[in-house]
Image (cartoon, grey):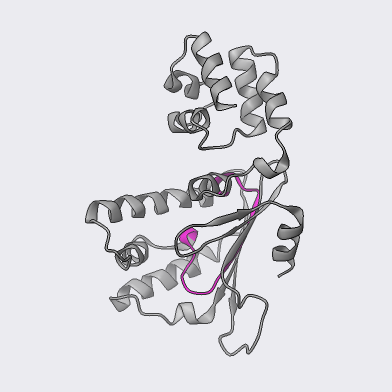
Amino acid sequence: MGAQLRHFRKLAGLTQAALAERPRVGEDTIASIEQGRRALQLDLAIQLDELLETKGVLRVAVERIPRKGRYQALVKDFVQYEQDAVSLFSYQSQLIPGLLQTEAYARFIFGCNYPPLEEEEIEKRVADRLGRQKILERKPRPILHFILEESILHAQPGDPEVMREQLLHLRRCMDLAFVTIQIMPRDSPRHAGLAGPLVLLETPDHDALVYVDGQLRGELYDEPADVSALMQR
């Protein structure tokens, strides 16, 4: 599909940047789709068919992708799905979720990476994380629901002022009508989340995805049985 898009774009005499301007997406989005690093979503396929006068070829291609191949288990893809999500439910057991982190908290977390990251890479990752938080300003509003282990709130990441400001930021986020934050008491002897963090989201096409982060890579699940099991949990 990426090769098809590249072919039709070149036939139209457009650069990636010029094509990206029409549907108001980033140039990197077009590049990623053409290189097969990002899935082409149905709504964008329809727009591109109209712009490139391809008579529905891209739309049909997207619609006929086997469900198993529709979502790629890559972090960068999940970030895009997150930004477009209609709703998102997150359970975290060790850290404040990235969408709710302050700049200082995020910088401390990336500074704990081992092997250590170069200062420039830390700053890049902090900027990327803060960029993801634009979802809090997006319209239409997404529904965001977070469950945090209470122990997260008692952690002391370096300077106590970092955690103080982080807790105040959480409190401000709780005043947003579309954000819910719940705390799992740390004296709960057993509960369904003991296996670790997970994030469930609903795409604009009303597909359900689950993202589970690991030490080396994340895993994205879209099989109905897997999604149902993790949603129940």
**Quarter containing the N terminus:** top right
**Quarter containing the C terminus:** bottom right
Foreground: 165 or 220?
220
Q: Position of residue 225 (x, y in %)?
A: 76, 58
Q: Position of residue 182 (x, y in %)?
A: 60, 73
Magenta residues?
A: 82-99
Asked if residue 96 lies in the magenta stretch, the reply is yes
Point 66% across, 31% down: residue? 43
Asked if residue 44 lies in the magenta stretch, the reply is no
Considering only vertical position in the picture, is 147 above or below 122?
A: below
Q: Position of residue 90 (x, y in %)?
A: 59, 64
Point 37% across, 75% down: residue? 164
Query: Quadrant location of residue 162?
Result: bottom left
Query: Quadrant location of residue 54?
Result: top right
Considering only vertical position in the picture, is 2 above or below 213?
A: above
Point 34% across, 75% down: residue? 157
Judged from this view, the residue extending furthest toward the left is: 119
